[in-house]
C-alpha cells in the first residue's frame, strides 16, 4: 500500500548536505517526492512510497545522517500528489 508523508525536520539540518543525502536515500529506496530548505531553518520533505519504505526512510532520518543533528520530525500523512521521481527544490 502506498502513502505520502509531509515531514518537517528541525535541528542542525541545513548547511550539512541534508537535501542531497535525503535525495540519495529516497532514490535508493525507490521513493518519490521533493526536499527543500525552509527560511526558518527547517527542511521539508514530501515523500511517497510503500509504508515499509517510508518507515525505513524515517528510521534512517531519525539517526541524523552525516553531520546533521535531527532533533524534531513532524510527520503528517497527506494525499498522494503523483510524484514520478525525487527532486531537490532549490
Image: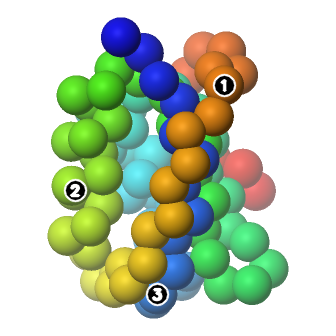
Query: Does residue 59 sit above or below 71 in this rendering?
Result: above
Of marks 3 and 1, which one's residue comes earlier in the chain?
3
Residue depicted at x 26% and y 67%: 62
Disc 3 marks which residue? 11
Q: Residues within 10 Å of mark 3 (few under 14, many from 20)?
A: some
- Tally of marks: 3
Residue under the point 44% across and 68% down: 73
Mark 2 secondary-structure assignment: helix
Answer whether labels 1 and 2 touch (C-beta < 8 Å): no
Does dot 3 land on a helix, a strand or a loop?
A: strand
Quadrant that contains the C terminus: bottom right
- Residue 84 relative to residue 52: left or right: right
Q: Point out residue 59 in the picture as x, y percentages from the top left corner.
A: 21, 55
Of residues 60 and 85, the one nearer the viewer is 60
Q: Which residue is mark 2?
A: 60
Residue 87 appearing in the image: no
Quarter of the picture containing the N terminus is top left
Distance in Å between CA atoms under marks 3 and 1: 26 Å
Residue 81 shown left or right of residue 50 in the figure: right
Amino acid at each position: 500500500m502506498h502513502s505520502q508523508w509531509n515531514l518537517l525536520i528541525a535541528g542542525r539540518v541545513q548547511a550539512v548536505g541534508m537535501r542531497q543525502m535525503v535525495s540519495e536515500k529516497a532514490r535508493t529506496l525507490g521513493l518519490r517526492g521533493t526536499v527543500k530548505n525552509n527560511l526558518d531553518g527547517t527542511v521539508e520533505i514530501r515523500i511517497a512510497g510503500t509504508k515499509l519504505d517510508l518507515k525505513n526512510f524515517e528510521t534512517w532520518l531519525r539517526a541524523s545522517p552525516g553531520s546533521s543533528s535531527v532533533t524534531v520530525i513532524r510527520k503528517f500523512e497527506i494525499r498522494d500528489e503523483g510524484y514520478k521521481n525525487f527532486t531537490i527544490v532549490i
